[in-house]
Image (cartoon, helix red, strand yellow):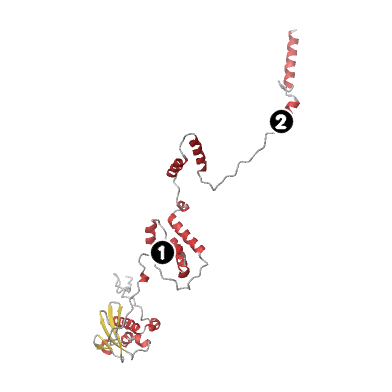
Amino acid sequence: MELGALRSGLRAAIASFRQPATRRFPVSQPQFRRLASTTTDQPLGDIRAAPPIDFSNRRDAAAEETAEDDDMEGGRSIAAYAAMMDRLRIIPASPSYFTGKPDFTDDLLNLENLLRKYQTLPVLPTGHAPRIAWKTLAQYKMGSNEPVKAARYTKILQVLQRLNYIHPNLMPDEVAYALRRYMRDVQPFHNQPKPGVVDEYGRARGVGRRKSSNAVAYLVEGEGECLINGKPLTQAFGRLHDRESALWALKVTERMDKYNVWCVARGGGTTGQADAIALAVSKALMVHEPLLKPALRRAGVVTRDPRRVERKKPGKLKARKMPAWVKR
């Protein structure tokens, strides 16, 4: 009896494990469909998009609305709130603040904008622009207090030179103001030498220098006589080359027999004194006849020769000559 009951119980347990599990609270089919459906029988109303953002307003527009709410509630006024934000918020004066060299970047951009704006204006021919001495790199760095390199400062100079070629009669005021900002305080090109004059005796005076020699020449219309330190030319210079060098300005212009020359030379040797006299005679001749300057410039007697004797160095026989090399 007990064995039969035990056998039937085991069979019931095994059968329960083989059958699938059933829901304790089954859901009806219509209710399941209603819950799974995404549509609703009742409308939710019209959906409206948010208004577009107006970027033309100030950045603290939202803060002003908050300030208005606070003002309505008895808080601070809008003006006081704006003043406080201006004190607390630090805004750079230029977008170039975020670059390594803000002042240099602003200067270059401003000049390029001017050039782009007035690049169609008439310009002067090449070589006829007014001569201007621009600020050096050291002077610009001192004013901007920024470590600007020479290559970058050259870009500013190139734009300035291009703006300087605009015709002076058509140059706008803002371009002229921009150019004056980069000029040196002292313009050496404005210091023109005083023109020479012929005195009451008909004499023109000229001064010349060469190496350690200097000379003063007086030129007057005459028959071609020449005195150097109170001596004739043949006695003052023994070499033929020095004689020709002293009166080279008169020879190339074919004025040997039209002027008398009286010179005083000091210092140096005969070669230096002869070249100094040539420069002095050339300057005196240009006082009498200014139109001879191009011919004298081609002859090479208008500007001073800056060459000097090179000094001797230690360990060398002369300025550059080395002693003979000995192996042993």
Q: Position of residue 314 (x, y in %)?
A: 29, 69
Q: Residue at x 47, y 61 (%)?
A: 111
Above or below, 181 relative to 95: below
Amino acid type indicated by mark 1: Arg
Q: How many residues crowd around disc 1 within 10 Å: few (fewer than 14), some, or many (20 or more)?
A: few
Task: Looking at the image, tell me whether mark 2 or mark 1 is earlier in sequence order.
Answer: 2
Q: Residue at x 23, y 87 (%)?
A: 230
Q: Quadrant of residue 295?
A: bottom left
- Single out the mark in the foreground, 2 or 1: 1
Q: Residue at x 47, y 59 (%)?
A: 110
Towards the viewer: 100 or 5: 100
User: Disc 1 designates what residue?
Assistant: 180
Above or below, 132 relative to 50: below
Towards the viewer: 52 or 292: 52
221 sits to left or right of 28: left
Q: Is residue 158 visible?
A: yes
Q: Position of residue 321 (x, y in %)?
A: 32, 74
Above or below, 316 relative to 293: above
Q: Position of residue 269 (x, y in %)?
A: 27, 81
Amino acid type indicated by mark 2: Ala
Q: Position of residue 272 (x, y in %)?
A: 29, 80
Q: How many residues crowd around disc 2 within 10 Å: few (fewer than 14), some, or many (20 or more)?
A: few
Q: Quadrant of residue 151?
A: bottom left
Q: Which mark is residue 36?
A: 2
Towards the viewer: 154 or 93: 93
| C-alpha gap between disc 2 and disc 1 | 81 Å
Q: Quadrant of residue 281?
A: bottom left
Q: Is residue 101 visible?
A: no
Residue at disc 1, secondary structure: helix
Outermost residue, left side: 230
Towards the viewer: 126 or 264: 126
